[in-house]
């Protein structure tokens, strides 16, 4: 065979997907090594050859997962998941004991933080509890410890705990770490985006929004704008209210996607109904332009109450055209209004 | 160039710059080893590990998206393969690969009842009925809501 480049060269034909129930797996590959002194090795390993070469430690007996690996895999587990996993077999039960203890500390810490369950709020005791939980490997406790540190102004320590949680795959930890890095001086945009991205693809809605914001700010790069808008949309669909507002704006001006007044209106209403004050203002204006006075006034009133002073002026203008009955009705509707929960459709 | 030898005695020659992503190999290289036997890593797993490290060795901006796509596809593996990879990556201290593997395996455990987990991972229940009952009783935690605490505002 002719001389090859000084890297290993692999011809790999695999068929996917492979069944995890141990069904037929076809792995045929050959590889070549290059060394003038050693003989070349060339193997074709078919299915049955591979099976006979398998070592016992790799025979995939998951009950034999080492404790430290098991703890890292389960680090992000919430209580129900931890309980289900603990009941799988004896070795998992024993191995996961530190995390179960961590859960108790986590519960304790939350009580101290909020002053519930008969205990007085005590941020220091809360921190102590979270640190115990974190020491036992729970990323939930790590994130909570980070939050407390951050609230106390001990930002470096907060970031360190977010980072611990982030490397173990905790989306909240990753999101918080990303946000902290953006706020650092100087900001570390590259690393921030890396962590926000991980949390975003894990479906963490807040991270999706933050990632979109971050990409959006780096204007001038068309790739970033499209991606930013894509993440706004994901976050909006996931129920993040600020993203709903932003995507409505994007649709109305055609930024990063095709302009659509219909979709702009839909998203603006969604944001408004969930309490976004600017959206309430915009949607109120929208209704006014369509001639729906009473409803327009309701939203403008809500926006005013939330601090949008511009909404007050517009509302005043419309009031002049309305009868007292209509005004009263609008005010009553505003009084009785409650925001929809962000997860509702 | 460093030579790695799998548990199946197959050898691979790889550039040092690629292999230093493994903390274990990096330490051995610093101690001037050029031939590194890996008795706990079989050939197929080692090939995958090398494939991963090669892809991640070149982390320029333009390759970021490719790397992300690669990672996504790389994780589409059977449990047996993930199992072998996690052992190997743990031994070799390849932190970026572990960061991918832990959540991947965790996702296959999450949000499932115990019996389903046993089936997926082919684990036999080795508790006696009484032991099982006792575990449930011992671990009867109050349900105070398991929200993942809020993030910064």
Image (cartoon, helix red, strand yellow):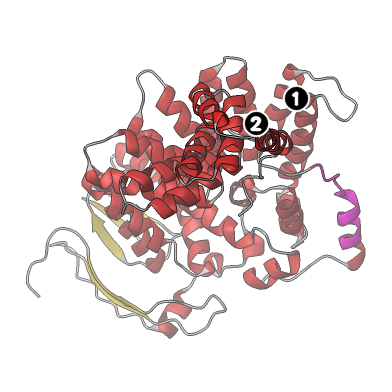
Furthest residue toward top: A153
Q: Taking the image as drawn, is residue A167 in sight?
A: no
Q: Find the magenta span and give its range.
A: B132-144
Q: Residue at x 76, y 44 (%)?
A: A100
For the image shown, how many numbered marks are present on the structure?
Answer: 2
Q: Secondary structure at mark 1?
A: helix
Disc 2: which chain?
A: A
Mark-to-mark CA distance, 1 and 2? 10 Å
Q: Secondary structure at mark 2?
A: helix
Q: Is residue A92 left or right of residue B87?
A: right
Q: Which mark is first along the chain, 2 or 1?
A: 1
The residue pinned by badge 2 equals: A144
The residue pinned by badge 1 equals: A113
Q: Is residue A109 magenta?
A: no
Q: Nearer the viewer, residue A300 or B45?
A: A300
Quarter-of-image position of residue B95: top left
Query: Which x, y percent locates residue A63?
Result: 67, 63
Q: Is residue A298 left or right of residue A290?
A: right
Disc 1: which chain?
A: A
Q: Nearer the viewer, residue B45 or A159?
A: A159
Q: Residue at x 51, y 78 (%)?
A: A19
Query: Which x, y percent locates residue A284?
Result: 52, 38
Q: Is residue B139 magenta?
A: yes
Question: Do the residues under discs 1 and 2 have CB atoms within 8 angstroms?
Answer: yes
Quarter-of-image position of residue A29: bottom left
Q: Residue at x 55, y 70 (%)?
A: A59
From the image, which quarter does the C terminus of chain A lie in?
bottom right
């Amino acid at each position: 065979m002719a001389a090859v480049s000084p890297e290993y060269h692999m011809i790999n034909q695999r068929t996917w997907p492979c069944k995890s129930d141990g069904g037929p797996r076809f792995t045929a590959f050959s590889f070549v090594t290059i060394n003038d002194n050693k003989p070349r090795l060339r193997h074709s390993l078919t299915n049955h050859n591979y099976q006979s070469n398998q070592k016992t430690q790799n025979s995939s007996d998951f009950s034999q997962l080492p404790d430290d690996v098991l703890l890292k895999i389960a680090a992000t587990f919430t209580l129900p998941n931890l309980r289900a996993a603990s009941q799988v077999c004896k070795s998992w039960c024993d191995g996961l004991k530190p995390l179960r203890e961590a859960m108790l500390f986590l519960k304790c810490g939350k009580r101290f933080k909020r002053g519930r369950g008969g205990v007085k709020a005590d941020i220091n005791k809360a921190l102590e509890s979270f640190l115990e939980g974190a020491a036992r490997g729970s990323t939930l406790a790590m994130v909570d410890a980070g939050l407390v540190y951050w609230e106390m102004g001990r930002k470096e320590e907060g970031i360190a705990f977010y980072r611990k949680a982030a490397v173990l795959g905790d989306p909240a930890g990753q999101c918080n770490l990303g946000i902290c890095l953006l706020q650092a001086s100087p900001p570390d945009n590259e690393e921030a985006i890396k962590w926000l991205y991980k949390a975003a693809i894990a479906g963490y809605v807040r991270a999706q929004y933050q990632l979109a914001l971050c990409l959006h700010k780096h204007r001038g790069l068309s790739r970033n704008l499209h991606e930013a808008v894509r993440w706004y949309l994901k976050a909006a669909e996931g129920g993040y209210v600020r993203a709903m507002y932003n995507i409505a704006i994007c649709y109305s001006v055609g930024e990063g996607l095709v302009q659509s007044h219909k979709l702009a209106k839909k998203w603006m209403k969604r944001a408004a109904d969930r309490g976004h004050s600017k959206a309430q203002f915009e949607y109120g204006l929208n209704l006014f332009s369509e001639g729906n006075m009473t409803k327009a006034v309701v939203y403008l009133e809500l926006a005013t109450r939330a601090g949008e002073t511009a909404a007050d002026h517009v509302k005043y203008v419309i009031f002049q055209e309305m009868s007292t009955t209509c005004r009263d009705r609008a005010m009553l509707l505003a009084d009785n209004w409650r925001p929809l929960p962000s997860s509702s459709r | 160039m460093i030579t790695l030898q799998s548990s199946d005695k197959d050898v691979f020659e790889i550039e040092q710059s690629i292999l230093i992503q493994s903390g274990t190999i990096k330490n051995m290289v610093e101690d001037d080893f050029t031939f590194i036997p890996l008795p706990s890593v079989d050939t197929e797993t080692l090939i995958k590990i090398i494939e991963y490290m090669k892809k991640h060795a070149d982390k320029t901006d333009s390759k970021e998206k490719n790397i992300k796509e690669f990672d996504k596809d790389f994780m589409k593996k059977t449990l047996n393969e993930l199992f072998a990879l996690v052992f190997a990556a743990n031994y070799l201290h390849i932190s970026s690969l572990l960061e991918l593997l832990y959540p991947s395996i965790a996702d296959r455990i999450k949000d499932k009842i115990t019996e389903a987990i046993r089936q997926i991972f082919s684990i036999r229940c080795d508790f006696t009925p009484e032991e099982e009952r006792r575990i449930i009783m011992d671990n009867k935690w109050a349900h105070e809501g398991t929200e993942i605490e809020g993030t910064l505002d």
